[in-house]
Amino acid sequence: MKQSTWIIVKLLIFVVSLGLVIYGQRTTGKMELGIMLIGLTGLLGLLYNYNQKYV
């Protein structure tokens, strides 16, 4: 894929992951904890992808 396409995909993943974390944090329960963990996994995946070129 082109570089600009990857940037758009990463931006979408970031927005969705951040939205999941914020939504899960507003309420309490096991389901919301799972939603937050999915969002956190997305954010950590993006961070891993960013740092991969420096390792």
Image (cartoon, helix red, strand yellow):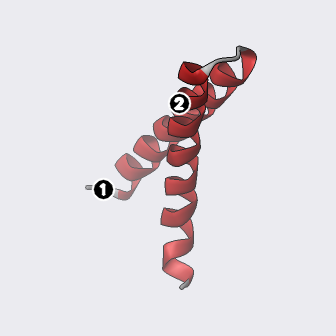
The furthest residue to the top: 27
Q: Earlier in the sequence, mark 1 or mark 2?
A: 1
The furthest residue to the bottom: 55
Q: Which mark is residue 34?
A: 2
Occupied quadrant, residue 21: top right
Q: Position of residue 33 (x, y in %)?
A: 60, 29
Q: Secondary structure at mark 2?
A: helix
Q: Position of residue 12 (x, y in %)?
A: 47, 35
Amino acid on which disc 2 is placed: Gly
Q: Position of residue 42 (x, y in %)?
A: 50, 45
Q: CA distance from mark 1 to mark 2?
A: 33 Å
Up-down relation of residue 49 to residue 27 (above or below): below
- Determine the residue positioned at 48% across, 64% down: 49
Q: Which quadrant does the N terminus fall into?
A: bottom left
Occupied quadrant, residue 39: top right
Give the labeled residue for mark 1.
Answer: 2
Total numbered circles: 2
